[in-house]
Image (tube, helix red, strand yellow):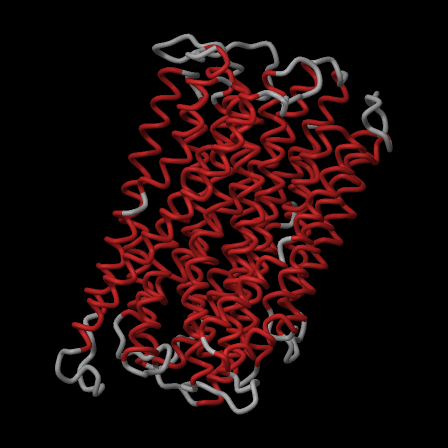
Amino acid sequence: MGTLWAIVLGVIILALVYVFFNYRKIKFLKEGTDEMVEMAGIIRSGANTFMKTEYKTIFIVVLVVALIFSLFVEKTSGITLILGAIASSAACVTGMKSATYANVRTSNKARESLSIGETVKVALCGGSVAGLSVQAFGLLGLVAILFIWGIEHDATGSGFLLSLKCNPSTMRITTYSLGCSLVAMFNRVAGGNYTKAADISSDILAKIRHDLPEDDSRVPNVIADFIGDNVNDIAGNCSDLLESFVATTAAGILIASTLFKSGSLSSSAFDSAMMYPVILAGGGLLGCLLALFIVQKKKMGDNPSKELNSATYISAFFTLVLGLLTSFMLFSKVELPSTFVLGWASPWVSAVLGIISGVAIGMITEYYTSTDYKPTQILAGMATEGEAFVITKGDAIGSRSCLLPVLFIAISLFISGKLCGTYGIALASLGMLSFVGTTVSIDAFGPIADNAGGLAESCHLPHEVRIITDKLDAVGNTTAAIGKGFAIGSAAFATVSLIVAYVGSYSTGEPILNFASFVVVAGGILGGALVEYFSAILTDNTIDSAKKMADDGDKLLSIPGVLEGKVKPDYNTMIKTATEEALRKMLFPSILALVIPVIGGLLFGVEFIGGLLVGATIVAIPRAIFMGNSGGAFDNAKKFIEEERLEGHSKGSAAHKAAVVGDTVGDTRKDVVGVALDIFIKSMSTVANTLGGVIRNFTLIK
């Protein structure tokens, strides 16, 4: 076993070295013209300022929660919670910094080479820093916890001030995951508000009130929009998927521990079952590293989607092969329970089901959101009939797109459970996330390309450069939509794994949640309603911020000389407004997901919380898919018209303005609500797992 730990640690170090290499490579590329250097510097400075300000709040919250755990629950759990927050922060800050260097260099590579293939390489190189950081930092912290403390089944932990009954090993793993959740929730809520308030207000000012180009540098909100792409679509997404990755790996370990304590696993089988999630995650990281290296070294053609998809397929292939070899090594010579229907291959097949689901969800999302397929093309055609037709058709596309992803998730969970019991469900979840390094790398390509296109227009680069960046931007919209679909799908798997682990923590024998119980049903109904309430809070916050920013932007545009292009607008004032609005409105919805399981559990007990988690998950998954895919379709329908692919219509036409309205509606859906819902259900499930023992012993109403 020691050799396997060393191999995983070696892969993590190798990945971090490659991250450092790519980060340095990006920084040494040329930025371009003086105007490009200036604009890129403003974006970089604004993103850094936002993150520094946000992390002052995150630091206080993490420190307070860590102290509560160490004082009142388990002494070392506060340390592991802080470790989780550090791992998540390291990944998202590294990824964001890389993106703010890569955006202008991508634009300049298009200017210098006029080659789509060469430009794609720069954007993907910047994205790979974010992607590999997510998997490497997330796994590093978990391996450190297991290496330092190991797994103790019969130990009882206590806090410095209180002596509550809890297993210290379970607390360390779950609080590590909770630390990741805290950072992810704040990043998604604050980042989503920042970027979409800036984006919507920018669209209102440029396209509707003043009939200006989309990324015109005269509009001060445009720069805030560029910054928002980095703080939400890069930093927010990194912390989001890192949290899912850590949660599913942790769930596998926790379920293995529960099975051992119930007598379902022998001692040797437990060692293998505990190791396999970590080894599979390490094998996936190696697969991502190899895939990204191969794709970045090969000569790229003029089809960015093909090149990016190849990275996913190569990663999945390597992960499949390494997962099979590891499954044979760990499980072929140990006594396995009857629930492992296929023997040593059961864990691997369960993981394969998750991998297949992840790839399938990506393909389905691409079909419903890409300009290359009928749904988005038909939606663009509807724009000729006006805004109402666009919104109605977009809603129908979003609703229709929910069925197949949910079907894949349901089938994978069902089969993996049949083949390998509750442990198989956790492995199916992890299988989907085992090559998350590549997934995030490709997803990060989107905002980097989007920023590159915006810089090309705002810095008045030649039209042929804008053609290249527009093509990359359209592909980036699709990769971002795929990334959101993947994040939602992975959240569904992760949450189900966490729910199984939670129910198993208080059940005797097989985890059972009685849906005939009025307590469970009451929790389920409330959980579903909370999803809608959470969505409403985020939507209201974003629209209120967008309205304020649009009005403030109008005042700045009214200054003599700004609209004529003779005087530069006050970008810093708008950046400050966006930052203040986002941070002022992030605390309540972020804390909501953490407080609800605690209050509900202490009042009504463990079964009520089990129902609440299931109800929230059932409502949130299709809701998030609907939000992400309808928003992606709205965005690309607008792009379809702007590329003059709808005969007789182009920028500035009535159809284009109708599509802009659809895009404005879709912005809040896909980049604020949809992406935050998965964090909402994961955070509640993580808190429930962390405090399951406390809730069981201190329920007020029995």
Residue at the image point whose x is 60% and y is 9% from the top: 154
Q: Which residue lies furthest to the left in this view?
A: 560
Percent coordinates x, y for residue 239 in the rendering:
47, 46
Q: In this view, does 558 lie to the left or right of 434?
A: left
Q: Which of 670 and 319 is in front in this view?
A: 670
Quadrant of residue 591 within the rendered picture: top left
Q: In this view, does 310 lie to the left or right of 35?
A: right
Instruction: Tell me if residue 590 comes above or below residue 627 in the rendering.
Output: above
Which of the image's four quarters has the N terminus? top right
Percent coordinates x, y for residue 340 in the rendering:
82, 28
Percent coordinates x, y for residue 123 in the rendering:
52, 68
Quadrant of residue 509 within the rendered picture: top right
Percent coordinates x, y for residue 689 in the rendering:
52, 25
Q: Nearer the viewer, residue 4 or 598?
A: 598
Instruction: Tell me if residue 165 comes above or below residue 489 in the rendering.
Output: above
Q: Nearer the viewer, residue 369 or 339?
A: 369
